[in-house]
Each structure stands twice: as structure tokens, then as C-alpha cells.
């Protein structure tokens, strides 16, 4: 069966929630949150960095995929695709995780560059390309490249390498740029967002275009004008309606400049909130979710929980207060 189409838009790396005493998966909280985000029009991404994938066992990853698919299908959201993180230290394990995710119901895999031996491969372009080529060849679902130098030993895929991989393998369908490099996004989009490129280099699923997605929401509006396709952002856990509205207005403003001032206003609020929440890490995001929805909890050890003083500071930060007010206004909640 062909995968559900991955469309331009906003996607959210869902946290993995844990029970306080045992650190077992807290599936009821996970189910609530997946549904909350998806009903806001934001696509869920499971077992990513924000989902503490590095702390999950293989069977826990597949449990999350099966659970999310069941929740979506049971609530009228069967057409929503699931992206699942399948990054691992070796090519072999990455492929195994891609296959397991596909068997559990994933539509797409997002694959981070292995960084443990960064000293040996960071400057070896052929080794980097060989890794992604082999994973793409052997994965039963299409993959997205995940460029996150901070979690990859500093390895930063450049725009030429990314566009070469996009052109050479039809099972690579996008890239997430958590490097935050707007210039890189612009260069990639100059190549892959041209209609002639899509015709010349079709994906394995003919209707699927190659998506260039930012890793933050502080440049959604500029990225749309560079012909980008949206973002995968942890901030969407806290403000999914607001970020979806920003994306929609940004796209609309291309044909209707009268909505540009409102898109700029939302972009400012969201950019400030993104910076503040990102600096608080996974623990800070969970603390804000705890205040908003009554679930969130702590990360898995050894990642420490945020201190109560720091959590209070994040919650009462003017940028977070402004963002939460905006989200409540747009969502009507």
C-alpha cells in the first residue's frame, strides 16, 4: 500500500511520556497528546529528539507507533501520516528500526546522521552519502534526512550533499533542518522546489514532492517566501493552533498580501516563544505541558528534570505568557 501523502505544513515531535515511579511509558498521556496535536491540524512525529528516542528500547518505539496509529484511526484521522524517528548508531540498526516502524504502522522514517564516530566520517562525504543511500534503499517506507549537528557529533550536512541525495534516491522525500540555517534552506529550495525538478526527479510515490522543513518556527514566514514547505517543531506541542495559523497565513500571503501584517505579527510572537522554550529543553517543554494540560512529567534519566524554580521562570516568562494567550485565543480554549 502506498504511504499516506506527506504534505507541506507543520509537524510536531511528540514527547514520550513516562510514569513517575517506574519510567514505563505513560500511554494514556501519549494518546491524549497525539490526538490533541493532530486535531489542531499538525502532523505527529514519534520517537524524535523531543520524544527522547535515544532513551527508548526498540519495542517501546513500536508500541508508540501502534498506539498513535490506533488513536488516529479511531478518531476520524486515518489519513494523517505518521513520521517515526529511526536513527541509530549503525546503518544496520537504522534499517532494522525502519522496518520495525513500518511494520507497526509508520508511513515515513526520519533518520538522523549517526554522530558517535563523527571524527571519522564528518568530512567523508562518500561515507555520509553511503549511509543515507543504503538506508533509503532498504527502508520499506520513504525517509527524511534529519540534519541536527547538535545531536550528531557536530556533523552538518551541507546544501549540496542534501540536494545530491534528493536527486539520487527516489525514496528520500524530505529534510528537516534543525541546524536552523535559513541560507541552507534557501539554497536547497532553489533546486528542489522548482517544478522542473519534481518532473525530472520524481519520488518513488509519483505525487510526493521533496519537502524542505525547518527545525524551528522562528523562520516559518521567511521560509515560505524561499519556497520552503513548513516546519517540524517542538513548539507545536504547546501552540499547535497558533503555528498552523502562522503557516496558513504565510502561504496565503503569497497571493494575498493583505494578510502579511498578521502573519508577521504571529511570526514575532511565535519566534520569541520558540527561542525561550527551546532553551529550556525537553524538560522545559514537559513542564509547560504539565501546566497546560495536566500531563508532561519528567524525562528519562539521566536527563534531569527541570528545577521547580526554572519551571516557574519558563511558565511566567513574558514570551511564553504571550504565546499561551495567543494559542488560547486561536484555539478557542
Image: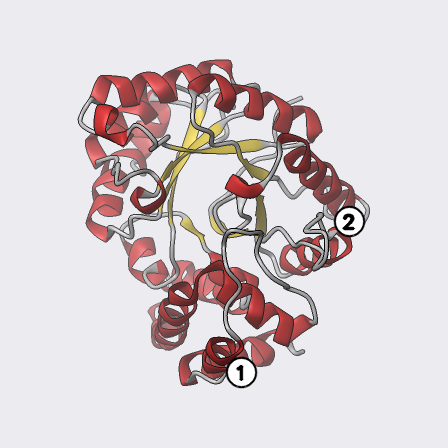
Identify which residue, 159 or 50, lies in the foreground: 50
Q: Residue at x 49, y 24 (%)?
A: 94
Q: Name the spot of residue 219 as percent of width and height, x first.
A: 32, 60
Q: Is residue 47 visible?
A: no
Structural crowding at the residue carrying mark 2, measured as other residues with C-alpha within 10 Å and reported as few (<14), some (14–19) or many (≥20)? few
Residue located 72% across and 37% down the image = 63
Residue 8 pos. (x, y %): 47, 46
Disc 2/disc 1 C-alpha distance (Å): 29 Å
- Give residue 223's position: percent from left, percent from top: 31, 54
Looking at the picture, tell me which residue is in the foreground, 332 or 248.
332
The residue drawn where x is 41% and y is 23% is: 202
Say whether disc 2 or disc 1 marks the residue closer to the N-terminus.
Answer: 2
Label 1 neighbourhood size at 10 Å, few (<14), some (14-19), many (20+)?
some
Query: Which quadrant of the structure image shows residue 47?
Result: top right
Residue 223 vertical placement versus 203 (above, below): below
Q: What element does badge 1 sit on?
A: helix
- Outermost residue to the right: 74
* Mark toward the viewer: 2 or 1: 1
Q: Residue at x 67, y 78 (%)?
A: 333
Residue 311: x and y, percent? 51, 76
Question: What residue did someone put label 1 on?
Answer: 325
Question: For residue 76, which numbered disc appears in the image?
Answer: 2
As displayed, is residue 332 above or below residue 122?
Answer: below
- 45, 213: nearer the viewer: 45
Instruction: Tell me where residue 167 sits by quadrant.
Output: top left
Apparent side of residue 79 relative to residue 214 in the rendered image (left or right)? right
The disc label shown at residue 233, or none:
none
* Label 2: which secondary element: loop
The image quadrant where one finds the N terminus is top right
Residue 164's quadrant in the figure? top left
Compared to residue 258, the image places residue 302 above or below, namely above
Amino acid at each position: 500500500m502506498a504511504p499516506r501523502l506527506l504534505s507541506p505544513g507543520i509537524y510536531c515531535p511528540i514527547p514520550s511520556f513516562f510514569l513517575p515511579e517506574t519510567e514505563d511509558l505513560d500511554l494514556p498521556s501519549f494518546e491524549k497528546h497525539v490526538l490533541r496535536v493532530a486535531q489542531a491540524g499538525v502532523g505527529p512525529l514519534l520517537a524524535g529528539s523531543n520524544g527522547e528516542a535515544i532513551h527508548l528500547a526498540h519495542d517501546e518505539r513500536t508500541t508508540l507507533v501502534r498506539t498513535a496509529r490506533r488513536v488516529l484511526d479511531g478518531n476520524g484521522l486515518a489519513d494523517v501520516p505518521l513520521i517515526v524517528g529511526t536513527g541509530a548508531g549503525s546503518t544496520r540498526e537504522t534499517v532494522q528500526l525502519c522496518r520495525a516502524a513500518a511494520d507497526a504502522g509508520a508511513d515515513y522514517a526520519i533518520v538522523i546522521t549517526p554522530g558517535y564516530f563523527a571524527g571519522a566520517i564528518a568530512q567523508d562525504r562518500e561515507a555520509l552519502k553511503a549511509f543515507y543511500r543504503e538506508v533509503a534503499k532498504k527502508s520499506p517506507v520513504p525517509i527524511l534526512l534529519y540534519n541536527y549537528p547538535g545531536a550528531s557529533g557536530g556533523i552538518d550536512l551541507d546544501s549540496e550533499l542534501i540536494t545530491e541525495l534528493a536527486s539520487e534516491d527516489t525514496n528520500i522525500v524530505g529534510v528537516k533542518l534543525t541546524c536552523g540555517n535559513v541560507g541552507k534552506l534557501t539554497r536547497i529550495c532553489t533546486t528542489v522546489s522548482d517544478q522542473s525538478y519534481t518532473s525530472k526527479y520524481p519520488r518513488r510515490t509519483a505525487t510526493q514532492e521533496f519537502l524542505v522543513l525547518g527545525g524551528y518556527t522562528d523562520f516559518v514566514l521567511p521560509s515560505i517566501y524561499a519556497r520552503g514547505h513548513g516546519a517540524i517543531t517542538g513548539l507545536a506541542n504547546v501552540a499547535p493552533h497558533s503555528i498552523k495559523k502562522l503557516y496558513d497565513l504565510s502561504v496565503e500571503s503569497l497571493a494575498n498580501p493583505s494578510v502579511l501584517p498578521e502573519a508577521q505579527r504571529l511570526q514575532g510572537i511565535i519566534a520569541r516563544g520558540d527561542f525561550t522554550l527551546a532553551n529550556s529543553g525537553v524538560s522545559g517543554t514537559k513542564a509547560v505541558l504539565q501546566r497546560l494540560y495536566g500531563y508532561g512529567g519528567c524525562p528519562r534519566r539521566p536527563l534531569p528534570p527541570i528545577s521547580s524554580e526554572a519551571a516557574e521562570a519558563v511558565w511566567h516568562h513574558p514570551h511564553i505568557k504571550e504565546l499561551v494567550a495567543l494559542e488560547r485565543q486561536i484555539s478557542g480554549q
